[in-house]
Image (cartoon, rainbow, N blue to C red):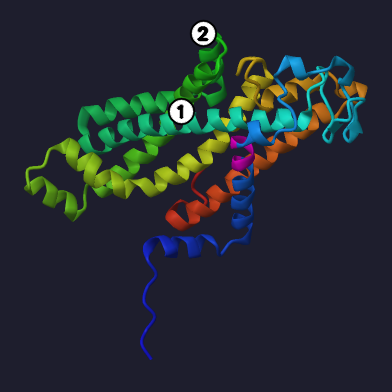
Amino acid sequence: MSAALPLPRWQAFAASFAESRLALAALAALAVILVAALAAPFISPQDPYDLARLDILDAKLAPGTQAASGFTYWLGSDDQGRDMLSAILYGLRVSLGVGIAATLAALALGMAAGMTAGYAGGWLDALIMRIVDLQLSFPAMLIALVLLAVLGQGVDKIVIALVAAQWAYYARTARGAALVERRKEYVDAAVCMALSPARIAFRHVLPNCLPPLVVVATVQVAHAIALEATLSFLGLGVPITSPSLGLLIANGFAHLLSGKYWISLFPGVALLITIVAINLAGDRLRDVLDPRLHGHYGA
């Protein structure tokens, strides 16, 4: 009987990831959340930000209440008569969009800085890493707060603030991976072929440094979403015209003592499920792509 052929790399990765039922459940939840957010304009019962479709008489209705118009507010309505289910779907679009955009931009910036420092070495490495150390000595929330106080509100402004607060995590990870890779034989062979340092670093070394960077990026998406929600809750994040889940939670916070719990509760539950699902999927991805990072990542 012939021996079984090894699985292709992507199939082996999928099989290893699927060994965790918790990770699969988290991945399924993320898929549902992403589809719901992308399809919000088509599946939402109401456009919650079309003033012509809002009725102040429907304000602060309890979950499951049917309005005089016949419309049922399954998750209740807020103080402006907006359907909470629709508002959450639209809020997911903003929260996920900001989190993913900030993560990709921070990854690109940090990866470039870290690869340059790790491969070039010398004074350039020392300079870049002193900047990274200075950045990491301040809490990410403080950096974002200071920048937003200067830049003002706006989706683009909060993305810039989150990138400034997070790029150093990727730079440190990329530098550590580059230091390991540049001592390997394939780098010596590339040097003997007279390839430029930039080509060696970004075309040959970088692909072998991607696994830990992908792991960090996955977890940092959840961190970026949580930071954005916190900043929006404080009134420094996205504007009211592009509300995220954090702003929806803040909108209902003033009504908690009057018993209108659903205005904050349901957006909070949606935010919690999103962050937990991303973290669970990221933890499994970490174990599969780079088991050496298990228990050592605490960004």
Q: Is residue 174 left or right of residue 16?
A: left
Question: What amino acid type should be assigned to the residue bearing mark 2?
Answer: Val
**Residue at screen point 43% across, 24% down:** 135
Q: Secondary structure at mark 2?
A: helix
Say above or below: 115 vs 81.
below
In percent of width and height, residue 260 lies at 88, 25
Give how far across and how far down residue 43 sits, in percent. 68, 36
Mark 1 is surrounded, within 10 Å at the Cα level, by few (under 14), some (14 to 19) or many (20 or more) other residues, namely some
Expressed as whole percent of the image width and height from the top left, the position of residue 272 reads 69, 38
Nearest to the observer: residue 143 or residue 105: 105
Q: Could you say which is closer to the camera, residue 53 or residue 5? A: 53
User: Which quadrant of the structure image shows residue 253?
Assistant: top right
Q: Main secondary structure of the magenta part?
A: helix
Callout 2 crowding tier (Cα within 10 Å): few <14, some 14–19, many ≥20: few
Q: Amino acid at mark 1?
A: Leu
> Of residues 114 and 272, which is closer to you in this image?
272
Residue, x 71% and y 37% (percent of image)?
270
Q: Is residue 139 visible?
A: no
The residue where tag 1 is placed is: 136
Q: Which mark is residue 150?
A: 2
- Give the magenta part as a residue range: 34-38
Look at the picture and state if 292 lies above or below 275. Answer: below
Q: Are marks 2 and 1 in contact (CB under 8 Å)?
A: no
